[in-house]
Amino acid sequence: MRNKTLSIAIGGFAVAALLLSSCSATPTGGTSGGPDADGYVAQVDESVQSTGGILKLQLDYDTAETGGLDPAVAEVARSWSIEGLVYESLVTMGPNFEIQPELAESWEQVDDTTYVFTLRDGATFSNGREVTADDVVGSLERLQELGTVWSAQLGPIESIENTSEGDTDEVTISLAEPYTPLLAALANTPAAILPMQELEAGDFDPATEMLGSGPFTMVEHRQDESWKFEANSEWWNAESLGVDGIEIEIVDDDQTRLAALRDGSIHFANFANPDTLSLLASTGDVTAVSQEQSDYFYVMLNTVNPDSPFVDDELRSKVNAALDRETIADIALAGAGLPTAVTPASLPGACAADSLPSYSAETDTTALKGQEFTLLIYSGDPSLSAVGQVVKQQLEQAGATVNLVTLDYGTYAERVYATQPGDFEMALGWFAGYGDAAMVTSWWNPDTAFFNAGFTQSHEDLNVAIAETQRLPVGEERDAAFAEVCGLVDRYAEMIPLATRPTIIGYRNDRLQASILGGEGYGDFLRGVSEYRLTEG
């Protein structure tokens, strides 16, 4: 059996830091454990009155979209988080990844391929105009026509129609075939509803302006520097807002953000480095929480380039068996990540990592003796570097020599994703895990995913199994289909899932009441900011 007792320190992580992740939050600071019974790692105390004022945040990086501020073309989590302050979708993601109402007050799945959404009465854009069914139809049709990253996530939509009757605004979405992830796909910012009347009249340019129906309006944006938002008095739930506005500074240095939290010059900051849990644990008045993301790290083994050693099936199996996901989560991610299979470990219906054949395979410490591999990672992500170091050590314990090479992201992307076939042997990256596990399984079909066609083979049995996970309704049959995909991916061992990628959030508990979901599917750690309450001006 594999060795479960590896004791190492990577990137400043001490084994003692693992113990900190199980501490509970206290009024004097510390770290929070996992989600509570309601699915939150932090919740607003409803008895506390807000003093109002400006919520001050520091984030690690800005949006950098080629389409500017247009949510329909947004491709990265930071864009989804920031633009989600202004825009709303039909539905949103709630605790435990449950779909909840947003602009759609309710919905009904009439049959396997028909969904009827009833729009919220009184919802308006920040210019005061009412949100209509035509805005919904036009926004989603526009998203389809743009052919963006998120367009494909909507699935096989056949039609989107305004089916309003009388005083009830209603939209009906019809699918060509069953597609269970539809609601989850609608719950992310790219599926936001835009003011189509103004857009089509040329009075609103979504690339340079933001005009939504959400809780805030954008006042100012200086690329890679700052954002300013004001509370939207036209928002349908404006009376519940606990802050008068939001100021966001873009600060790429972790230590600077840590210092700002400690000295109280900001209320809230995010961190990719799980080491932050231990660094903030002893800071009184600051609480650090780990939000479980469905995003996860994975290793790519190139089976397309004939010069890659991993065209050998048996060699890939040996590498897969040597990788200990639990140790990666515990050591590289300070216990804040979860071992995972293809289906993100935090999502409902996920297959357990310890159910994979490679998990129970005997690990021969000389299985890879005489083998030498080059493992590519890219700079700028401390947790990626830490995972890379643990992967390197695990493979070396199995007898291999591993050369860990760090590249700038542009060079990395060119060699791994753009070059055909891929110019690498092994590479480490991470996936966005999304809000439904079937949205992730599709990445293992290079015929439709495209990005991995230069380093993975197409397997008919796997492609059929992937399609089943998207077609079947939630339940035991779908869970069994997920398990089949997990098993096949484990056997082929071309893209090997490792552990979920956590987000660490620090906030001033002496000045801020925050509601933070325990799990998040779209990296949107600002989801729920409308509920925050400032307790000191």
Image (cartoon, rainbow, N blue to C red):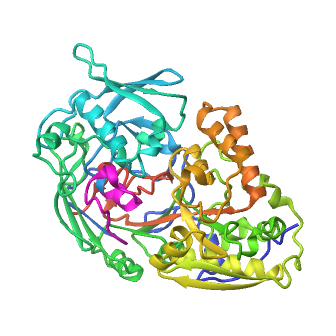
Instruction: Check the picture and name the quadrant holding the C terminus.
Output: bottom left
Q: Residue at x 76, y 50 (%)?
A: 487
Q: Is residue 509 visible?
A: yes
The reply to whether the magenta stretch includes residue 72 is yes
Instruction: Check the picture and name the quadrant holding the N terminus.
Output: bottom right
Q: Is residue 94 visible?
A: no
Q: Residue at x 74, y 71 (%)?
A: 310
Magenta-drawn stretch, dominant element (helix, strand or loop): loop
Residue 110 coordinates in the image, percent (x, y): 47, 19
Q: Is residue 228 above or below residue 182?
A: below
Q: Is residue 270 above or below residue 470?
A: below
- Front-most of residues 178 and 40: 178
- Front-most of residues 216 and 343: 343
Left or right of residue 507: residue 120: left
Q: Is residue 532 above or below residue 309?
A: above
For residue 154, which quarter of the picture? top left
- Front-most of residues 63 and 267: 63
Residue 477 coordinates in the image, percent (x, y): 70, 32
Q: Residue at x 17, y 43 (%)?
A: 199
Left or right of residue 265: residue 450: right
Q: Which residues are magenta?
A: 60-82
Residue 352 coordinates in the image, percent (x, y): 72, 51
Left or right of residue 122: residue 80: right
Residue 499 coordinates in the image, percent (x, y): 64, 63
The reply to whether the magenta stretch includes residue 273 is no
Q: Residue at x 67, y 76 (%)?
A: 425
